[in-house]
Amino acid sequence: MRMRDKPRQARQIRSHHLRLLVLSLTTLIAISLLSRLPAWSLLALRSFDYLSTVDDPRPPPGGPVIVAIDEPSLADINAQWPWPRSLHAQLVTQLRAAGARVIGLDIILAEPSTPENDNAITNAVGPDVVLAGDETLIETPQATQLIRVTPLQQLTEAGAKTGIASVDLSGDGTFRRIPAYEDGFAATLAKASGTISATLPAGQLIQSFGPARSYPTVSYYQAIDPAHLLPPDYFKGRVVLVGLSLQNAPVIDKGGVDAFATPYTVHTGTLTSGVEIQATIYDNIRRGLSIEEARLPVVAACILTSVLLAAATVWRSTGWLTIVTSAAALLAFAAISFAGIRLAHIFVSPLGPTVAYISVVFGQAAFDYAEERRNKRQIIRAFAQYISPDLVRRLSQDPSQLKLGGERRTLSVLFSDVRGFTTIAETLKDDPEQLTGLINRLLTPLSEVVMDHGGTIDKYMGDCIMAFWNAPLDDPDHALHAVKASLAMQSAISTLNRELEREATQRGGRPHVLKMGVGINTGECIVGNMGSTRRFDYSCLGDSVNLASRLEGASKNYGVALLLGEETARLVAGTYTVVELDRIIVKGRTVPSPVYTVVYDADAEALAAHRAFTQAKYAGTLAPSDPAFDRLAADIPELAGYYAIMRDALAGSSEE
């Protein structure tokens, strides 16, 4: 990198880092505000749904058995719901006889029925039976009322325990948390079974165990006669829950009786029965599997870490590697959150870190993209006046091909100048509009020729054009394209002369005949943006540029329209016939430089004769009376003027 580029690059880096810092701070503030919205909490909980069920956990061994009041039982018992309580009493008796440790009836028995049925269930219950209660909060504009429904007093007096079976639902109607009831149904079951040893984890997130019907389930009618309809000891030592559980899980959009959405609903779209939810709560309490949400300092630290990681990812720049790194980072956030759930029973939502990371990375990528687009527009504006639209398009698509600020490259440099234009300008000094129009008519086709041949126009100097090839884009055939452009420029001048002649004839005046001389040289140059910080041009400089300018000026001294430097001639010799004209010492040089031109109408014999002619001229053995002058002028008519000038020069030196 050149020294002049370093301050500019340092400014770009500082600007990049400053934008990144502002973006990071803005992201932290924005996420802090967004996280206070209810919708944000629901999104975080939805991420918990996916992560807590991604490995499809199953119910722990030794958990509850569910006796389902389902379709087969309704058909087999063939009685109108609600069933007589004497039937429930029979079930409790059979379950106790089958060895059930604790029996939970997720059925509300709050209102009296017939004395016979109430007495039957009263005689059947005892300390090993938990009956469901309910608690409902009713809010009206006038008041807020908490209504608690409990079983009949005679049932609790008979020793049965009461457990509130109400559940807390999140804002999206999904069951995810341990109910905040010390006397909750599942908590009371755990106490009655003697398995609870810790404080109730009220409000903590619950670990689900599969979709609906994941727990061992038998139909109500089977449990009434377990000796004949179930395997031996099926209920022995087990906690048994009895409740409504349809065999076909209800679909979420159709709702269901005593059925709720759970984290598994995101996978299945179905609801889970209330009795199975109570079994899930029981296992979470029994096995200590509930999941605590990370507190604010931990969440804030994770988000801050994510922002810092994102800033490190795009600290230098953004590109395809950024996408790969971002994908890996987002997967890592999800994996860490999953590991926290499984290993530490702590849920750190990946939502905050993910949104923070994406905001910083893609925000910076957007800045970089905008800057790239801005650079492309600058490139297009800077070069559209100098090079062809095709080259401008290639530069805008791949700015890496352009190295601004100056670089060393081998260029083919062209200078063109109209012979006698000063005289033409003198004749038109009283008509500046016509002079300006003539210059524009002259430079327009010549400029188009240069750009059509892939050249870059450096500058206009009156009627003179300076152009070069092989910058800003690589052009392996730069010398050939420069020579082709020079020949096309001569053709364009001829076309313009015919137009001027036709216009002059119509006016009845004399036409301005334009003739052009061109010099082309190939060599190493310095090319890049040159000038001041407020105004600059894409230009080139160097000894090779100076020689090209001298060649253009010297072309009139040899009677040819095109004069080539030695390297240019060598590079195009395979396409054009080039002949050496002389060896000259130009201003600023001490070593003679051979100069060449292009000819068309010359056979091998004539070319050999020309080479002998130039060797004799160098050796000083050529005389003005040498017949070679006339013979070569006839054989190579394009160089007739050159031979005449050489003869006159020899004749003049002889007289001296």
Image (cartoon, rainbow, N blue to C red):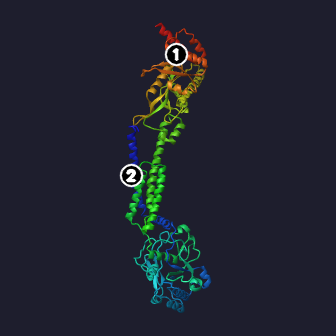
**Residue 371 visible:** yes
- Residue of label 2: 21
The image quadrant of residue 288 is bottom left
210 versus 320 height, above or below? below
Q: Amino acid at mark 2?
A: Leu
Among the two numbered marks 1 and 2 on one chain, the one whose residue lies closer to the N terminus: 2
Q: Are marks 1 and 2 in contact (CB under 8 Å)?
A: no
User: What element does badge 2 sit on?
Assistant: helix
Front in this rendered view, residue 578 or 463? 578
Neighbourhood count class around disc 1 (C-alpha, 10 Å): few under 14, some 14–19, many 20 upward: some
103 versus 475 height, above or below? below
Residue furthest front as drawn: 232
633 versus 395 height, above or below? above
Front in this rendered view, residue 534 or 392? 392
Q: Amino acid at mark 1?
A: Gln
Neighbourhood count class around disc 2 (C-alpha, 10 Å): few under 14, some 14–19, many 20 upward: some
Q: Residue at x 50, y 67 (%)?
A: 53
- Residue of label 1: 615
Front in this rendered view, residue 239 or 234? 234
User: Can you give x and y, in whole percent of width and height, for residue 171 in the image?
Assistant: 48, 69
Q: CA distance from mark 1 to mark 2?
A: 73 Å
624 versus 471 height, above or below? above
User: Can you give x and y, in whole percent of width and height, for residue 552 in the image?
Assistant: 49, 23
- Horizontal placement of 17 versus 395: left or right? left
User: Can you give x and y, in whole percent of width and height, for residue 247 in the image?
Assistant: 58, 76
- Horizontal placement of 229 versus 433: left or right? right
